Image (spheres, rainbow, N blue to C red):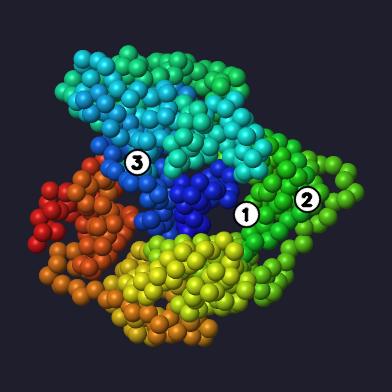
Amino acid sequence: MILKINYHNYLYYSINDPEITDYQYDLLINKLKYLEKKNPNLKQKNSPTKNIGNGIFFKKKTYKHLSPMFSLNNIFTYKEYLKFVIKTKKKIKKNKKKIELICELKIDGVAINLIYKEGVLIKALTRGNGISGEDVTKNIYNIKSIPKEINHEKIPKKIEVRGEIFINKKNFKYINKKLLTNKHKVFSSARNAASGSILQKNPKVTYQRKLMFLCHGYGYWENKKKPKSYLNAMMKLKSWGFPVDKNICLYKNDKNIYSYYNKIKKKRKKIKFDIDGIVIKINSTKLQNKIGYTSKFPKWAIAFKFPAEKCVTKVKYVKFQVGRTGVITPVAYLKTCYIANIKIKKVSLYNLNKISKLNLYINDIVIIKRSCDVIPKITKVIKSNNKNKKKIKIPIYCPSCKSILKYSYKKTTYRCYASLICKDQIKKSLNHFVSKNAFNINNFGPKLSNFLIDNNYIKDFSDIFNLNTYILEKNSFISHKKSKKIINSIKNSKKILLYKFIYSLGIRNIGTINSLNISNYFNNINKIINVSLKDLYKIKNIGIKTANRFYRFIYNKKNRLIIKKLISMIKIIYYKYDKKNYFYNKKVSITGIFENYTRKYLKNFLIKSKGIFTNNVSKNTDVLLVGKKFGSKFYIAKKLNVNIIKENKLKKILIQ
């Protein structure tokens, strides 16, 4: 699923050619969040749910923000809002006193960071991963509402001004009408159009799109006299020529905030641009600093989203899809309907239990709701005397390979166990195999995977190393130049680290962390393919179920043949471990943001040191590496007397 999300990120942000709508993308993200919450052991370091914003795809040059650019956590009910207030009051020990809170519109646009030096705009960066963003300065110069120079005596020498770039509803309709006239693809939403516009290669296109900007904050502020409150900062920025939304309000009373929320919700359709809720922030900057941040969100701000909208439509038919690990998911295809201008053609039914709970039939009239204004789902079947009702036939055989389907443990899922014999599973497994954390083969997307497998050029993973430009160019969308790049990338991928090779096999529950743990324990591919269950049980952080799954996969005859074929075609790289290294065989977790090191660098250092990664802090954790803006792991580690290493001490260890 991570690979699928990264693929759609690439289409959306790098080549401005999305295959899915915003709501379908958010469906994937929310589904991944749900799965990670249910199975915390499966959560990976590279998960898109941990990234701030939507990542960086290096279409343009990237630069570091002067200060991290955080995203916002979401709430959807008044009860959740009250919990947020209680939490913040506890942190600042003001249970009885009233706190000043700012309310403003949550614009459904693209976040931007504007860097000014001596009053002149020198850089404009997208949010990117929160630490670095893509340079879109040339395009931003075409937005009239963004000041290119600030003419004021008291401006800081250096400042980051942050806000939202968007297209108003009227212009969005005009852009899509023009695209249709010229027989081009239309944008699925105004946010999609705004994002595509600021990433354009040609600044003239950005200018024609009539992008707008509203300021909603600041980052770095190089001045001893920083604003004492958020409202004070906004008023200063407004006086310097930055557009600030007129709907901004200051409140001390929870009921007033809820009234503001309901008022904005009622007049939402009349507002000239898209919004999906309101943003609530602690006004005092002193209190903001005291409350702090998680690795992704400020704890002093929250987005209060509007409830889902509904539509009534008809179920045309149900298809059963096969996932990478063989899970069968029913998908209902609908008569096209619209919720908040978003076209909805299909919805996931998640599992077979959902069909029986809804008592759903083909040709039923149903209510579709966009949960959290994002995920479409069937909430109710409208009872009718429809003579055309047809029962949904639950498949006995896999829709892809015709193997007999079986219920998994506790009958929670329906699964095809054919693994790498099943074409649909091979396609999704191949996408996983070529991904960044595996063989890292560039330009090898799902379209190409499908073509190669459907035309029998690839029957198993090893066939990828027998490809040539002639085969690739049989696919109409692969040019000679692109085919050469892919073949070069395949050649370069033949040298691979052991843990990446383990991860590439796509074994259930074996993500990057478990791959590292297995790799560090054995550090030899022959030991791994001849492993015993006893040895697998000895590995720290590998549970019995995971060990059993790994063992079954390795000793499956067909899988074994593929693995041996692969080993003969590639070179696996092993680390030579220094037992004197501080992190050798220690369980290490990480929290916060480091000034001098990226997480990738620390991760690679720990691999070389044979350190054992853990996502969570427990009594078995040996070390917690702590950067700035650390999260709850720090406090858990303190309670459990885990050895805490901050960046200044970490420098000395890494230099040794």
Q: From where the camera sits, is residue 621 visible?
A: no
Distance of mark 1 from mark 2, alpha carbons? 17 Å
Structural crowding at the residue carrying mark 2, measured as other residues with C-alpha within 10 Å and reported as few (<14), some (14–19) or many (≥20): some
Which of the pair 344/309 is nearer the observer? 344
Could you say which is closer to the camera, residue 434 or residue 592? 434
What's the residue at 40%, 68% (across, down)?
489
Going 41% across and 42% down the picture, which residue do you hit?
A: 53
Residue at image mark 2: 316
Pointer 1 or 2: first along the chain: 2
Label 2 amino acid? Lys
**Neighbourhood count class around disc 3 (C-alpha, 10 Å): few under 14, some 14–19, many 20 upward:** many
* Disc 3: which residue: 135
Q: Secondary structure at mark 1?
A: loop
In the rendered view, does 122 fall on the left or right side of 126? left
- From the top left corner, tell me how far across and down residue 377 is, in percent: 65, 44
Q: Are marks 3 and 1 in contact (CB under 8 Å)?
A: no
Per the model, the C-alpha gap separating discs 3 and 1 is 39 Å
Q: Dot 1 corresponds to which residue?
A: 350
Q: Mark 2 or 3, which is nearer the eye?
A: 3
Which element carries disc 2, helix, strand or loop?
A: strand
